[in-house]
């Protein structure tokens, strides 16, 4: 059984994340989507809101588990016997930070490989922060996030 962890803020989940989840399921038997509980990042959505949005938009099959996670990713990977950590690479700008993290995680959890996946080209410029910036001014984000997330963003920014 090959288990991969896909960690991130998912604040909120976008079609780019969903693209990576789809690709991850082609490679691994199970995916654990680990939503980071990191108050330093001052997320727009609470842990539970982010969890609810991820759960509602990922297949409920037993191949995906969604959890809130606090602490060291390397520890979680070891505890859950994960052979891989999935991260996305959109542009060269992602590279430096991701490279550093991947090597450190290899040091901390040697049996877990970081695997980088590239999204479909149309999602390469998509990020949760850009989506929030557009939604804040009621811009059109319908092509970039699931309908439920679009509604949640509208509510959050007082447009519904
Ligand atoms: P983090 O705060 O850990 O970067 P994010 O939710 O922003 O959390 O991203 C989680 C992971 O998903 C990262 O590896 C990021 O590169 C990837 N990701 C986010 N948006 C996209 C996208 N549009 N295409 C591909 N990967 C993405």
Image: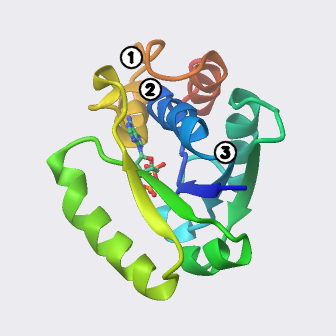
The circle drawn on residue 135 is 2
Q: Which residue is mark 1?
A: 139
Rendering coords of residue 93 (x, y %):
17, 52
Label 2, residues with CA under 10 Å away: few <14, some 14-19, many ≥20: some
Residue at disc 1, CB closer than 8 Å to ligand 1: no
Sequence-wise first label, 2 or 3: 3
The circle drawn on residue 111 is none
Residue at left offset 53%, top offset 77%: 111
Label 1, residues with CA under 10 Å away: few <14, some 14-19, many ≥20: few
Residue at left offset 16%, top offset 49%: 92
* 95 left or right, relative to 141: left
The answer for how far apart the CA atoms under marks 2 and 3 are is 16 Å
Name which quarter of the figure residue 123 lies in: top left
Q: Are marks 1 and 3 in contact (CB under 8 Å)?
A: no
Rendering coords of residue 60 (x, y %):
81, 32
Instruction: Classify mark 2: helix, strand or loop.
Output: helix
Name which quarter of the figure residue 155 lies in: top right
* 130 left or right, relative to 144: left
Rendering coords of residue 42 (x, y %):
51, 60
Rendering coords of residue 39 (x, y %):
57, 68
Instruction: Classify mark 3: helix, strand or loop.
Output: helix
Q: Are marks 2 and 1 in contact (CB under 8 Å)?
A: yes
Residue at disc 2, CB closer than 8 Å to ligand 1: no
Q: Which residue is mark 3?
A: 50
Residue at left offset 82%, top offset 33%: 61
């Amino acid at each position: 059984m090959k288990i991969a962890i896909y960690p991130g803020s998912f604040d909120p989940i976008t079609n780019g994340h969903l693209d990576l989840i789809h690709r991850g399921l082609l490679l691994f038997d199970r995916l654990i989507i680990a939503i980071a509980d990191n108050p330093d990042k001052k997320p727009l959505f609470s842990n539970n809101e982010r969890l609810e949005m991820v759960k509602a938009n990922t297949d409920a099959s037993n191949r995906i588990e969604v959890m809130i996670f606090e602490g060291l990713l390397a520890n979680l990977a070891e505890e859950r016997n994960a052979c891989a950590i999935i991260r996305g690479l959109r542009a060269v700008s992602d590279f430096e930070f991701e490279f550093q993290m991947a090597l450190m995680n290899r040091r901390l959890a040697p049996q877990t490989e970081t695997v980088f996946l590239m999204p479909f080209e149309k999602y390469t410029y998509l990020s949760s922060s850009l989506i929030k910036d557009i939604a804040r001014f009621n811009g059109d984000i319908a092509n970039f996030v699931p309908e439920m997330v679009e509604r949640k963003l509208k509510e959050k920014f007082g447009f519904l």
